[in-house]
Image (cartoon, rainbow, N blue to C red):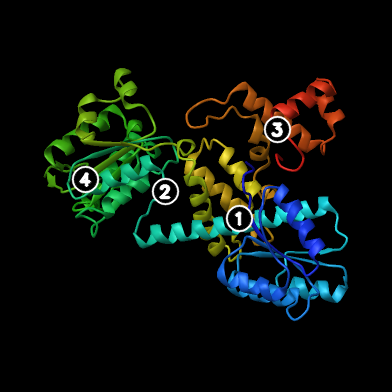
Amino acid sequence: MTENKGKILVVDDERLTLKNLSYILTKEGYEVVTADSGSSALHRLQKEEFDLVITDLKMEKVSGLDILEKCKEWWPETEVIMITAYATVDSAISAMKKGAYHYITKPFKLDELRKVVKEALEKVNLKRENSRLKEELERLRANQVEFITKNPEMRRILETAEKIAPTDCSVLITGETGTGKELLARYIHAHSLRKDKTFLAVNCGAFTEELLANELFGHEKGAYTGAVNTKKGLLEIASGGTLFLDEITEMSPTMQVKLLRVLQEKEFLRIGGTDPIKIDVRFIAATNRDLKKEIEAGRFREDLYFRLNVVSFRLPPLAERKEDIPLLSYFFLKKYAKEMHKEVKEIEESAMEILMDYDFPGNVRELENIIARAVALTGSDKISESHLPEDLRKLKIFTYRKKEKTLPSLEEQEKEYIKLVLKETGWNKTLTAQILGIDRATLWRKLKKYELDEEGSL
């Protein structure tokens, strides 16, 4: 049975044209409903929504323009294609101004009809997907969820984070760079009893041992040359709140010993000080390294690990949560369109396919940068393939990417590569066969095997 690819209402008062259009579109796999007058078309449109309406322009009583106006009023996302034997510049302009997707003159060419119908339905699907994503984003914001995700594993992590947030236990977060470790730390703080107190973040790899000690513990006046005033450290400033120690594995062995004492005694000394200062701080630490390997190599203290690792989370890379890419893409699109004062609202399907195929070694942070760049580059209301980085477009086929944690088969790679070469050669099969290093007969067999044809697969 042919898979339904869209629901189309065809309107024409010429029965032969109506019958031919219905036959052609049904054969292409579309669900087709017909109306032999404008009045019956409006009656049908009042009751149900269609993906696409194809209507004759000149009809008695109710014209194609009347149908166009009512369709856009009742079903804004439905596209309308006008067909007429009486084409004039004025009628075409009038139809397009009122929102018609395209204008085809009789007698129409079948290839042109198929192409326009396919593109119109792609636009409808894209608009509906945009609307669905926007609704999902609003739902997430309404629930005050800082994480934009619908990935089951991420949802479980957030549920657990909310449960342990009201406690004061230390938390250890692991995951690749750019997966959102600090965001999760802020999420835990925001759902804790400390949410009205200070949240401070420090990157342990950004300081030398001496500077990090000064940042965390502060110093007394005269503790060293240049210490003209007493300075509070982050431990003291964060008291009552949360301190996030990012890249904890970059901390020197000496600093690890000092931090362990703070965790055990809940007090510390300023540099140059003699009086212990009591603190009430919730510690959250994070790293992109394998802590067990760091312990085995002697670079990280096991006792400190156990102190920090009361509750632990591993954030999955973006490659393991592909379903979040569209949501995150539109989240960042809206963010940067607002910041850059641009009316960018859509990401074309072909551009989204490239994003979905990419592995994102830089994770969510890399996706954010890509979308920000695309918003800056586009001169229209949408992001297309051309606005994505060139190397990203080239990597669409040539990466051995993991799909659902499994490597693609050789056949999958071959099919993708044949599709790429066909597209690049404009479906010149002789040239494609030459590039692939095979004869035309072999290419023909592979096209048949992989069900590749000009109308559908590319």
Q: Secondary structure at mark 3?
A: loop
Measured in 3D between alpha carbons, the distance from the residue under mark 3 to the one under mark 2, in whole angstroms, is: 35 Å
Q: Nearer the viewer, residue 198 or 219?
A: 198
Residue 233 in sight from this viewpoint: no
Q: Earlier in the sequence, mark 1 or mark 3?
A: 1
Binning the other alpha carbons within 10 Å of mark 2 as few (below 14), some (14 to 19) or many (20 upward) gives many
Residue at 58 percent of width and 73 percent of height: 46
Residue 359 in sight from this viewpoint: yes
| Tag 3 residue | 451
Measured in 3D between alpha carbons, the distance from the residue under mark 2 to the one under mark 1, in whole angstroms, is: 20 Å
State the image coordinates of residue 233 (x, y, percent, origin top left).
25, 48
Q: Nearer the viewer, residue 138 or 23?
A: 23
| Tag in front: 1 or 4 | 1
| Tag 2 residue | 149
| Residue 164, numbered circle | 4
| Tag in front: 3 or 4 | 3
Residue type beneath disc 3: Glu
Q: Secondary structure at mark 1?
A: helix
| Tag 1 residue | 126
Q: Quadrant of residue 1?
A: top right
Q: Are marks 2 and 1 in contact (CB under 8 Å)?
A: no
Residue type beneath disc 2: Thr
